[in-house]
């Protein structure tokens, strides 16, 4: 039992050993080892989820082909213009990179 007890009116406040606040785990010891372990596990799960999503992607060359055709049309250039030149002029990312960014934003 704890040495101190606190009351609000006639009610005793419950004393707890661990408390989560804004993603930080506080507990009655002044050591943050528990907090770093919990955050490390959560970060590992998040990274694993991202890696699984990236490996789950299939080749989307057909989507990139449509995007390349659109860039050629909007820029009014020949169909043999290098893709890197078109990307440089438009600043558009390939569909693979856009999907990776979308996964990271979630």
Image: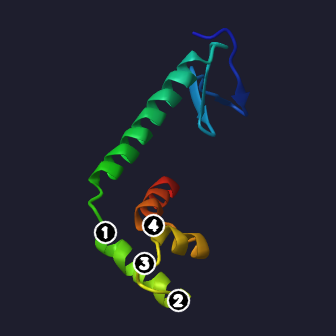
Q: Residues within 10 Å of mark 3 (few under 14, many from 20)?
A: some
At a point 71% along the width and 27% down the height, the residue shown is 7
At a point 30% along the width and 67% down the height, the residue shown is 60
Residue 68: percent from the left, percent from the top? 42, 78
User: In 3D space, how far apart are the residues under numbered discs 3 and 1 (Cα atoms)?
Assistant: 10 Å
Q: Which residue is mark 4?
A: 94
The answer to which of marks 3 and 2 sits earlier in the sequence is 3
- Which mark is on residue 61? 1
Q: In what element is the residue under mark 4?
A: loop
At a point 62% along the width and 18% down the height, the residue shown is 32
Residue 10 quadrant: top right
Quadrant location, the N terminus: top right
Between 86 and 28, the one lying in front of the other is 86
User: In 3D space, how far apart are the residues under numbered discs 2 and 4 (Cα atoms)?
Assistant: 16 Å
Depth check, mark 3 against mark 4: the one in front is 3
Q: Which residue is mark 2?
A: 74
Residue 87: percent from the left, percent from the top? 53, 71
Residue 86: percent from the left, percent from the top? 52, 75
The answer to which of marks 2 and 1 sits earlier in the sequence is 1
User: In 3D space, how far apart are the residues under numbered discs 1 and 4 (Cα atoms)?
Assistant: 10 Å
89 is higher (above) or lower (below) than 10: below
62 is higher (above) or lower (below) than 70: above
Q: In what element is the residue under mark 1?
A: helix
Depth check, mark 2 against mark 4: the one in front is 2
Residue 9: percent from the left, percent from the top? 73, 34
- Which mark is on residue 68? 3
Pointer 3 and pointer 2: residues touching (CB < 8 Å)?
no
The answer to which of marks 3 and 1 sits earlier in the sequence is 1
Q: Residues within 10 Å of mark 4 (few under 14, many from 20)?
A: some
Q: Is residue 77 left or right of residue 4?
A: left
User: In 3D space, how far apart are the residues under numbered discs 2 and 1 (Cα atoms)?
Assistant: 20 Å
């Amino acid at each position: 039992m704890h040495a101190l007890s606190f009351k609000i009116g006639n009610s005793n406040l419950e004393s707890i050993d661990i408390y989560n606040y804004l993603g930080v785990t506080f507990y009655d010891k002044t050591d943050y080892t528990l907090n770093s372990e919990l955050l490390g596990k959560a970060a590992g799960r998040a990274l694993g989820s991202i890696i699984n999503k990236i490996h789950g992607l299939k080749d989307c060359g057909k989507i990139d082909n449509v995007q390349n055709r659109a860039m050629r049309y909007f820029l009014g250039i020949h169909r043999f213009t290098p893709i890197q030149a078109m990307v440089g002029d438009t600043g558009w990312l390939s569909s693979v990179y856009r999907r990776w960014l979308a996964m990271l934003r979630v």
